[in-house]
Image (tube, coloured by chain):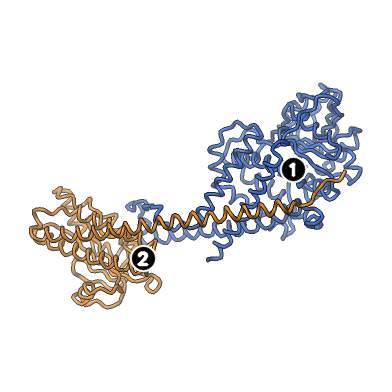
Amino acid sequence: MPPMDFLAYIGIFLGLYFSIFVFSTFFEYRKSIYKEELKKNFPKVCLIVPCYNEEKNIGKTLDALLNLDYPKEKLEIIVIDDGSTDKTFSKAKIFEEKDERIKLFRKENGGKHTALNFAIKKTNSRFIGSVDADSYVKKDALKKLMSYFEDEKTKAVVSTIKISGAKNVLEQIQYLEYLISAFLRKIFSLTNCLNVVPGPLSVIRREVFDKIGMYKDAHQTEDMEMAFRMQRANLKIAHSIDSIVYTNPCPTFKSLLIQRLRWRRGFILNLKDYPDLLNIRRYGNLSFLFYYYIMAGSVSLILILWGVWKIISLILNKIVHFSWINFDIFPLSLPKINLFSFNLGPLFFLGMVSFLIFIFYIIISRHLTFDKKNLRWKVVYYVALYAFLNATWWFSALFSVVTKRKAVWR
Amino acid sequence: METEKRINWKKHILVFFLTLLIFSSGFFLNNILSEKKMTQLTDTQRDLTIDILSLETQFSILNQAPCQNLNESILTKELYDISKKLSLIENTLGENNPDFLRSKKYYSILELKHWLLLKRAAKDCDFDSVFILYFYSDKNSYPDCEKQGYILTYFREKYPFLKIYSFDYDLDLSALQSLKEVYSLKKDLPILIINDEVYFGFKDKKELEEILSEYIEIKEETATTTPLTDLDEAETTEDDAD
């Protein structure tokens, strides 16, 4: 068997194993996917909005927060302008003057973690949330999210992030990616292996900061590092799948690469900082998930690189062929494709099974997040491009780690 | 405060066996299709035998009065269909399979019969035609054969009136051996025999255009003046000349 075929079988086996684990967990816990929203005894919550040069988005973000269905006297919104050079501060000021729930502060630029820590010190709320300045929280999201804190063991709750206004191909791919992530995040929370408290909307009990400390720079992935530390301290993180927050997608290949490079680089370096999280006896499912990421990631990276090489050599081969006829290609008719003449083999069938599983992921994710969008083209773009994009991000992240380059935000 | 993080090994064992089951089903489905493929292949080989017999009979009938009844396009199309079936068998069984080699020999004989008939018809019925016999061998030992095959495919597409017949030089077939002797062929591949003239070695696009220029011009002139038979629409004999 050619080595790449063997590797492809391993890749498919790993993917199947992971998917069956995910679906079996889903059916095991299908009755506890949702939690009834909070109707009384609303605790006081402080939502922190750290922002840097967000003049275009801050208004919409604050509008959404002020529109939240949550008792006014129990909601505090702290906006931290982290040394913006645009009109972010003046735009936020208008909201502060309009609504007493909003408190606006300005500080020297120091990074997102410094802005969050600055705000934590300004509030005495028992529950502290973070909301990215380009994210728009759905009206009922906070009520639903806070209900998870009725369980005293729950120390942090994360929300479901959806893409707002996906237009171009890359944005539509991100839409589907976030949709599937919502389902996976629920499964990870049910198996206690959530490894990020994402910026768009997450709420953490104040006692967590007292116990394990404040946010750190953490290779510009402070939300991931906080989750890693919480997991190390055995602090439970839950996911409220029907608490929806919308975020802007990265519109260009470059902006998306910068974001994903930062996330993946952060994952590698944070794992390097906390290698004990790979102790499967101590951290169980989380370690298992990390091992899975490493194995499946490596296999798919090699396969994708090989696939790209095959495509390039096919194109080069075609160019050589065309050169034999001095590039007079118009008389040539299109090649006649006869499916039966391909030697498909078991890989083809396993590939079809993988595709069906992928469709199953989409159906469940849609159902769980009440998504009504037409996904047809999103699926086409995702299937055609995601593996290549993902390989590019991982490859860039590995390169950045090896060459010790610093990540940038945008 | 602390949460349960232990791995549920029972669940993982169950998941492992379930994965193994689905994984094996891929191989199982593949086996079913392979069996179906083999059945279809047997049918194709049977069809091929009938086609060959039918074509042979057509050649015999037409040999009696080629000018009156010659519907060359049907003949050529049938030969082309056989070549397609043959390439299907080659893809499935491999180029060294005895069944495939046997069919390939049949096909080569049919090509020769087609060539001889059309050659005679061209002479007796007075129509212009260009016949190219192309000898090749495996592309690893003779890399130029791959190039030559591609260029000939291009010519066949561009000038459909060219009748190109390709033969494996190493095929153990007495009829081919006779052809090699008649034209005094030596193994300097690729070899082209264009209207009885032998050319050894690779001929690039420009060289081939020069060789064929006389015929191409004649054909184009004829095409603009006399809308002859449906010769020009006919497919040539090889699906892929290499």
Chain letter of the orange region: B
Chain letter of disc 2? Answer: B
Q: Foreground: A37 or B126?
A: A37
Q: Foreground: A224 or A359?
A: A359
Q: Kindly identify the residue that appears in the image at 30 percent across and 77 percent down.
A: B187
- Tell me how many marks there are: 2
Q: Kindly identify the residue that appears in the image at 17 percent across and 52 percent down.
A: B221
Residue A166, x across and y down, in percent: 61, 35
Q: Foreground: A180 or B103?
A: B103
On residue A237, the disc is: none
Chain letter of disc 1? Answer: A
Vertical side of A377 occupied by B118: above or below: below
Residue B77, x across and y down, in percent: 24, 54
On residue A190, the disc is: 1
- Pointer 1 local density, CA inside 10 Å: few below 14, some 14–19, many at least 20: some
- The quarter of the picture where residue B62 lies is bottom left
Q: Amino acid at mark 2?
A: Lys
Chain letter of the blue region: A
Residue beneath disc 2: B147
Q: Amino acid at mark 1?
A: Leu
Mark 1 secondary-structure assignment? helix
Please state if A311 lies on the left or on the right of B58 as rendered.
Answer: right
What whole-number distance in Å separates the C-alpha atoms at marks 1 and 2? 61 Å
Mark 2 secondary-structure assignment? helix
Q: Foreground: A247 or A180?
A: A180
